Image (tube, grey):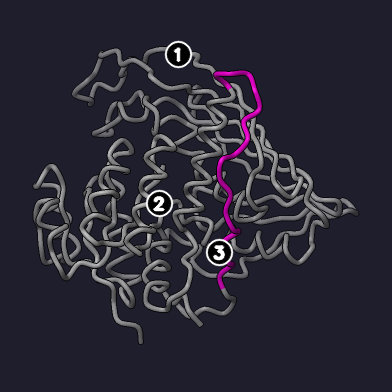
Amino acid sequence: MMQKVKIGVIGCGQISGKYLKNCTQTFDNILEVVACADLMPELARQRAEEYGIPKVCSVEELLADPDIEMVLNLTAPAAHAAINMQALHAGKHVYTEKPFALNREDADRVIALAEEKGLLVGCAPDTFLGGGLQTCRKLIDEGWIGTPYAASGLILMGHPSSGLHPNFQNFLRLGGDPLLDMGPYYMTALVSMLGPVRRVAGSAATLHHEVTIMNPKSPRFGDSVPVEAPMNVTALLEFESGVLGSLQAAKESFGYTPRLEIYGTEGILYAPDPNFFGGKIAVKQHSGEVKEFPCSHGFTDESRGIGLADMAGALRAGRTHRANGMLARHVLDIMLGVIDSANTGRHIAMQTSCERPTPLPLGLKYNRLEL
């Protein structure tokens, strides 16, 4: 049995509950959460009591703790790179929520410092490790749709006009915009299935330049809040394999409409929502028959943190972890390239590439990522 990796969590907002539940229950065979910190200490104390975490402290105290090997960074997007750098300077491996950074320069600094210090860097999303997308990867690799030649994704959402999220205004800025907020799920899924991207093009627009908070339960009810990032983005992707892809991402409408499809010479793969770990999987075959497939892999329920657990296992086993920094850096490069293209009217060549993550083995036992 592998020795557990001691984890310190920085950032105890809404998303931390899902991570901490899985880190302390599903993946407790490899992870041990020993401390948590937040700029609002009461949030850290609440999470510590809820999940039995023994230590609540400041960020500085957490980073100075010699027992903590790995930091889980769940802060707001604008703070990701700075916290990652602090953790690395403190000699800690770090796994961060997406996006990896808000610009290429910060992302490169994180990667360079990690390499210099011999430390691991990981990044969400890890939904591509769920049973749904792992099954899709298996179907593609086994030739169920022939040779892939195109892909398309769709994510339509509404503005966060309820104002109930404590940091709702972040969803109107770069990092909370549809491309950098929801795009990582789709881009990471596509790269994991089809490989890296060679160049991109994009267009971006904003229909509403401010949002009025309409929910009377919100403390900001009636306030008008400016929209600071594009809320309607179309991305065109040219993969190194020759596959062509597109993604429409918007927060200008209502509800939640996701779609991801891969087109091949012998069939069409209807993939599940990349924001989740399971879901319906089907292939439309050359004959016109639509065949549904059960998940070939586990982790089909809410499994946020599987990337962190895989990184901890990789640290102990001396292998490459799957939700790694180079994958996250390439996904960021893709998304920023789309924005650059929208601003310049030109195709943008990628500055980075990456390896397709190794698929998870079949037949894993519950909560295990190694055979």
**Residue 319 pos. (x, y %):** 47, 73
Q: Give the residue at mark 1.
A: 208
Q: Are marks 3 and 2 in contact (CB under 8 Å)?
A: no
Specify the quadrant of the image occupied by residue 348. top right
Residue at the limit of the structure toward the bottom, as seen here: 1
Residue 346 versus residue 359: which sits nearer the camera?
346
Q: CA distance from mark 2 to mark 1?
A: 36 Å
Q: How many marks?
A: 3
Specify the quadrant of the image occupied by residue 186. top right
Specify the quadrant of the image occupied by residue 209. top left
Label for residue 21? none
User: Element under label 3?
Assistant: helix
Label 3 CA crowd tier, 10 Å (few <14, some 14–19, many 20+): many
Residue type marked 1: His
Label for residue 111? 2
Residue type marked 2: Ile
Label for residue 131? 3
**Residue 356 pos. (x, y %):** 60, 59
Please tell me whether the stretch drawn in magenta is mainly helix, strand or loop.
loop
Residue type marked 3: Gly
Which residue is painted at 32% across and 26% down in the image?
Answer: 162
